[in-house]
Image (tube, rainbow, N blue to C red):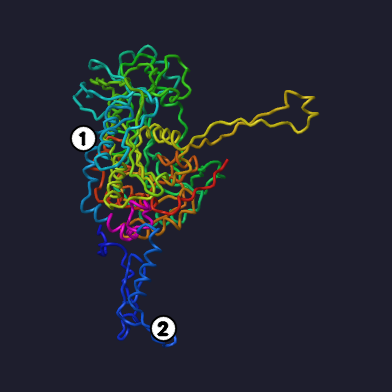
Amino acid sequence: MRARKAKPRPSGGDHRGNRMSPDQRGLGNPPSLVFPCLGAVLPHPRFRCHLPGGEKSGLRTGVFWGALLAALATIQAQPGPTDRSATNNPAQADLPSLSETVARLCDEGTNRSQVAEIFGHLTDVIGARLTGSPNCRRANDWTRDTLSAWGLTNAHVEAWGPFGRGWSVRRFSAQVIEPQGIPLVAWPKAWSHGCDWPIVGEAVYIGDKSEAELENYKGKLKGAIVLVSTPRDLPLQFGPLATRQDETNLLRLANAPPGTRSSPRRRPPAANMAPPGGRAAPSRPPAIEGAAAPAVSNAPPSVSTNAPPRRPPRSMDPSARLRFAVREGAAMTVSISGSRDGMALLVGETQVVLPESGAEGGWRSMRAWATNAPAGPPQVVVAAEQYNRLVHMLEAGEKVRLAVEVQTQFHDHDLMCYNTVAEIPGTDRRKEIVMLGAHLDSMASGTGATDNAAGVAVCLEAVRLIQSLDVNPRRTIRIGLWTGEEQGYLGSRAYVAQHLGHYTERTRPETVRSPRDAAQHPEEASRSTTRRALVKRPDYRHFSAYYNLDNGAGRIRGIYLQGNEALRPIFRPWLDALRDLGAHTITAANTGGTDHIPFDEIGLPGFQFIQDALEYWRSYHTSIDVRERASVPDLQQAAIVMATFVYQTAMLDEKLPRKPMQE
């Protein structure tokens, strides 16, 4: 991208007062003395001036100095416009215009960018950042220290929780050893238990068995390595690996009425049986769904007009086969990867199997990170192509033996998790807050590059770019890097509840209409209804906006208004200034699936940007979510756009307008 070159500015303040009218520049007119600091133009004391009516009067030196002293007395009580230490109000200072701000951010963000170095450290040096893991805490500390080194204030890690146990892999390998040697592309599910010695056993396939057919396997699975998933067809992929938003889809977004919802995270039709855990892998760039149902919250539901085709009903819950294998004493369970792309591993979390049959209230009734989750055999995911081959070998009558070494470690010395928080302090509106953020945690496989080291790197670079402007913002700019997002926005929800507000249940007594009825039916004299009540923290009224980035490593193409049309005339000039960078679309549609939701749910302005997908839909939550899936120029552009929105919001005269709250 090409940055627009900023026009050189005169030094020492706004010199627009130096411009003289044509009459003042004309021949025969007396010269004047210009005082920009006074905003005045005074006649020179050595020249006469013509008063109205043509009468000449000598404006002598005494008259001149009198006028000068009067002007000085007028401004003596007012601090100079460039004296920021006296006024602490940048609104009166010589601030860059919007176009100049964008030009300066473009220059810094392209010619001296640090986003590639930040992104590379998070992905290649630190690596996967599962919530609660040592790597996640290392990322907390590194981002805190980086922000502090850049001069941000109050840089710290802020605890939330308790969450539960952390987890990491110490050693892993898997291969077929009979009837031939086949190295397997595989990985343990997050929070899986391990084994101190290699597991060697015969493979048994029960992935297509009904509940009645499983009765034939009772007492026969002890010590076996059990394949519990159904094979999947993997059609050839003729579409592009990477995609960008085309003008057609951007136009659909721009024309979407308020109340519709964009669905960037949708299970692909081909994913017949994704493993339990994590969010389903999306299959395509965001698409606008149909009109929403009547709103009952700030994030109304919608009826899809472009949903994947319905799969035929399963004869049996897939997780039931896994539970059966565990209770029958299997040495290990093997599931098929939910990814349909090139040996990639889509790895979710371990399914907790309770000892008693029928004790589950759904497979998520107890999460694997819970400190009281019972131990069980290792749970491993194998690439779909290789899983299909194993099943085909078994169905052909081959005896297949596997050897798997899986050593994992639980970390329960600290059950708390942490967000990274830091600030650029404001000036005259320092109590008011503008936030930007992204989630720091990732899934266990890959290195969490597009989900979401990219968003973190963009946010870090954005605050560095704002610092480079060397202009103190009016409002405090605060960055929040969240953990626990992959488990349900846990870190950002905890931050919002602690600092901004949260809902609580409120019981409302309602008296019956008549005292006579009350006397006759005392048990009905009082009824109660339970409604949600918003408990507002002190920062709630000072909060202006939160900007989030978490839809991959592609450039920003616009912003979701989350149904708040009052923001359109505010955001439009900002995007007009960024049009050359490819960001220009405003949509009234809602989008979800990430950390702006906790802000939006309590009525605060929270936003996610529209982004190019690139390879996000291919690498989402998989082992190929690595550094190479990102484009550095796209990250640079996103940082410039993010910095522009955050800085402009911090400099407005008023906080951003909010949507009406719905009871």
Q: Which residue bears the numbered disc 1? A: 125
Quadrant in the picture for residue 96 = bottom left
Quadrant in the picture for residue 294 = top right
Percent coordinates x, y for residue 65 in the rendering: 34, 71
Q: Which residue bears the numbered disc 2? A: 51
Q: What is the residue that sits farthest to the front in this orientation? A: 62
Q: Is residue 578 above or below residue 630?
A: below
Instruction: Compare residues 608 and 142 and report the one nearer the observer.
Output: 142
Who comes first in sequence, dot 1 or dot 2? 2
Residues in magenta?
A: 81-105
| Prevailing secondary structure of the magenta residues | helix
Q: What is the residue that sits farthest to the top in this orientation? A: 219
| Quadrant occupied by the N terminus | bottom left
* Secondary structure of residue under mark 2: loop
Q: CA distance from mark 1 to mark 2?
A: 78 Å
Instruction: Compare residues 104 and 93 and report the one nearer the observer.
Output: 93
| Quadrant occupied by the C terminus | top right
